[in-house]
Image: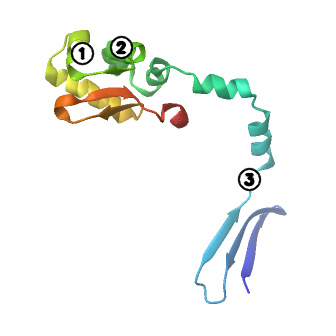
């Protein structure tokens, strides 16, 4: 038979704790404030779609520092237009050395919105398939 205890603050149920007599498990139920469900349900489908259709540039301009974004902007635009970029293409687009391009691509991958495929000699950088889920 479970043992229940509840926390009430100002007469309002905040959470419930449940365990058995041997205390072999512990479950806590946290109640969601009614306003949370109201806010979620009132969002329109167009707002959800608008969020999912944000470009890589828009997202990264908010995630990266302005100085980093300005350095990476040419690479980001190229990835948006072509769908992917190789390190050699990144060197040509940015006019930077291979070492600098590696640093730039590492920053992009570090955001989680760009992913690398392939090995070191045949790397291709693409927009992450999880971008719209993560943002």
Other residues around mark 1 within 10 Å, as few (<14) / some (14–19) / many (≥20) = some
**N-term-proximal mark, 3 vs 2:** 3
Tag shown at residue 89: 1
Residues at circles 3 and 2 in contact by the CB criterion of under 8 Å: no
Give the residue displayed 58% in from the left and 84% down from the top: 24
> Would residue 118 be found to the left or right of residue 22 on screen?
left
Question: Which residue is labeled 2 in the image?
Answer: 78
Distance in Å between CA atoms under marks 3 and 2? 43 Å
Question: Which residue is labeled 3 in the image?
Answer: 32
Q: Looking at the image, which is closer to me, 5 or 52?
A: 52
Other residues around mark 3 within 10 Å, as few (<14) / some (14–19) / many (≥20) = few
Residues at circles 2 and 1 in contact by the CB criterion of under 8 Å: yes
Distance in Å between CA atoms under marks 2 and 1? 9 Å
- In the picture as drawn, the residue positioned furthest to the bottom comes out as 22
Q: Looking at the image, which is closer to me, 36 or 112?
A: 112
User: Residue 52, position in %: x, y?
Assistant: 59, 27
Q: Nearer the viewer, mark 3 or mark 2?
A: 2
Give the residue displayed 31% in from the left and 29% down from the top: 107
């Amino acid at each position: 038979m479970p043992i229940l205890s509840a926390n009430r603050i100002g007469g309002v149920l905040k959470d419930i704790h449940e365990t058995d007599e041997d205390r072999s498990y512990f479950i806590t139920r946290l109640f969601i404030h009614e306003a949370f469900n109201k806010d979620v349900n009132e969002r329109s489908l167009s707002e959800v779609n608008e969020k999912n259709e944000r470009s890589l540039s828009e997202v990264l301009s908010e995630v990266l520092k302005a100085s980093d974004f300005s350095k990476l902007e040419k690479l980001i635009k190229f990835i948006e237009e072509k769908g992917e970029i190789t390190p050699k293409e990144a060197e040509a687009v940015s006019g930077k050395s291979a070492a600098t391009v590696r640093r730039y691509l590492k920053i992009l991958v570090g955001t989680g919105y760009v992913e690398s495929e392939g090995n070191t000699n045949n790397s291709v950088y693409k927009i992450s398939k999880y971008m719209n889920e993560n943002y």
